[in-house]
Image (cartoon, rainbow, N blue to C red):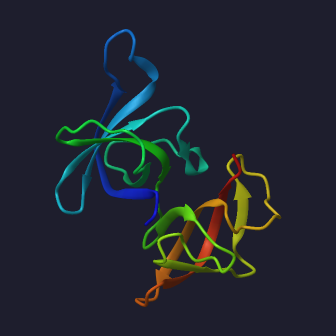
Amino acid sequence: MSRYASIAGIVTSLAVQPGDQAVYSPCALTLTVQDYYGNANTVILEPTAYVLNQAPIRQGDVIIVFYDTAAPAPLIYPSQRRAVAVVKPAYAQSAYLDTFDQNLISSDGLLKLELSNLTETRTQNGQIYDGTLDGRLLLALFGAATRSIPAQAVAESITVFCA
């Protein structure tokens, strides 16, 4: 099972992170994301969260939010998660955050990445990454995928989380 899960949907509202003086952070945002099933999800977007290409998040944007399933979360409705990574995908583009083995199969065994000579591999700060990918946390963007298990997809870009 993957340690990371995702919420995909439309940003219906965003505001500065509310809370008391001990929790309030003017640098954090609270997003409400309505998923494709109509469920409302509250996402806390802190300055430490990775936002692909530093794309500004606005109301009405379609986004994919990845969160750590092992992180503590309050048992409230709507669910509240702290974002690890956020992607504003292009049309017909998907994203996946997970660790991958030497064959580029995700830890949950659901996705196998294929690389092409057009695949961009960079670190979080945008530098070209030339090392091995196995065992690293990767954010992969891809288009069409097969319906097999694991699904196979050609990665358009990969962001390597080195820390």
Farthest residue, direction top: 21
The residue shown at (38%, 17%) is 23
Please tell me which residue lies in front, 150 or 122: 150
Q: How many marks?
A: 0
**Point 46% across, 57% down: residue:** 3
Image quadrant where one finds the N terminus:
bottom left
Q: Residue at x 30, y 53 (%)?
A: 10
Estimate the x, y position of residue 68 in percent, counting from the top left.
44, 49
Q: Is residue 42 above or below residue 99?
A: above
- Residue 21: percent from the left, percent from the top? 37, 9
Identify the residue at image location x=31%, y=48%.
60
Residue 87 drawn above or below residue 75: below
Image quarter in which the C terminus is found: top right
x, y percentage for residue 43? 34, 41
- Residue 59 occupies which quadrant of the picture? top left
**Residue 45 falls in image quadrant:** top left
Give the camera-side residue of 80 and 117.
80
**Left or right: residue 117 compared with residue 83:** right
Q: Nearer the viewer, residue 19 or 141?
A: 19
Residue 122, by quadrant, is bottom right
Q: Position of residue 22 (x, y in %)?
A: 39, 11
The residue sitting at the right extreme is 130
